[in-house]
Amino acid sequence: MSLDHRTDYVNNIRSGLSLIIYPLRYVIDLPSDIFGWGQTTLVSRSTLQKQNKTLRTQNSILQAQLQKSTFIEAENIRLRNLLKSSKRVGERILIAELLSVNLDPYRQQVVINKGLSERDIFMGQPILDANGIMGQIVHVNPITSTAMLITDPGHALPVQSLRNGIRAIAVGKGASGLLELVNLPNNTDIKVGDKLVTSGMGCVFPAGYPAAEVIEVNINPSLPFAQVIARPAAKLDRSSEVLLVWMSDESRKKISIACVDSNEEQEK
């Protein structure tokens, strides 16, 4: 102990002995090390499996939330467009959601989630989306209402051209999702690309709402009228929210005057 305390000779001896004893200690500790390694490996594998399962579950939840977020974002964009449309319209409006769509090719109708529970909803009330006229209410229930789209074969929409003011009647063509301007003579000044808006005639739709765009003009000299096909401005096959429109007092007065004048002309 004195030599170990005062000199470094014993350190050399200790180093030599530790070198000789190391293999023996390794052999003695080997079973314990093997057991600990195996236990650690098995526990880690089980833990990894649990963590992997948890992460997969969280990933599925996050993907579902992301899809919902994408839907909400798209819905917000549509609602913002509707609000912009309502500002442009300047009438009293109410946003409604589509509940169902009639798949009958000869009946272009939709059901919305507003009915008699909402004050002042009435038969013939115009509906539109962010792009233009969609149709009008044809039946009102306590909770829901049915609207006929402008592409329904039984629907007629008075329109006029923004380019030259020519008036016409746009009739729905059913499943094709298009409109046809009827009873236009062959010499009518109508061209592909002409924008059509509601004319205000017919005492239903206020004037100036976007209605359609002319996409085809066929003139057959053997026939008295031209065949004019138009595409609705509204996204009839995509819109999931619509605007119910109440006319302003000014629009109502204009339509009333137009209706009175029209009735007087018919009587004459």
Image: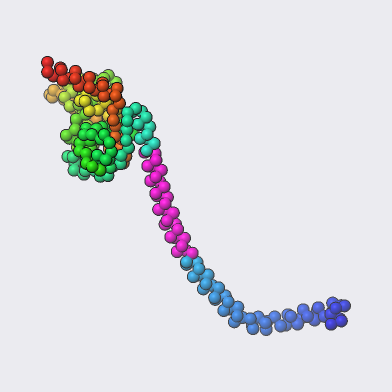
Left or right of 185: which side holds 208?
A: right
Compared with residue 66, is residue 242 higher up or lower down, i.e. above or below? above
Left or right of 268: which side holds 150?
A: right
Q: Report which quarter residue 187 is drawn in.
A: top left
150 or 266, which lies in front?
266
Left or right of 168: which side holds 2?
A: right
- In terms of secondary structure, what is the magenta stretch mainly? helix
Whether 53 is among the magenta residues is: yes
List x then y, in percent, for residue 8: 84, 77
Compared with residue 12, is residue 239 higher up or lower down, i.e. above or below? above
Compared with residue 13, is residue 236 higher up or lower down, i.e. above or below? above
The quadrant of the rendering that contains the N terminus is bottom right
Residue at x 73% of width, y 80% of height: 19
Q: Report which quarter residue 79 is drawn in.
A: top left
Residue at x 26% of width, y 32% of height: 126
Camera sees residue 118 = yes
Residue at x 22% of width, y 41% of height: 141
List x then y, in percent, for residue 116: 24, 39
**Residue pushed farthest top?**
268
Camera sees residue 151 = no
223 or 138, which lies in front?
138
List x then y, in percent, for residue 234: 29, 34
| Colour scheme of the rendered structure | rainbow
Whether 52 is among the magenta residues is: yes
Total residue callouts:
0
List x then y, in percent, for residue 11: 81, 78
Residue at x 13% of width, y 23% of height: 224
Q: Which stretch is magenta?
A: 51-78
The quadrant of the rendering that contains the C terminus is top left
Compared with residue 120, is residue 70 higher up or lower down, i.e. above or below? below
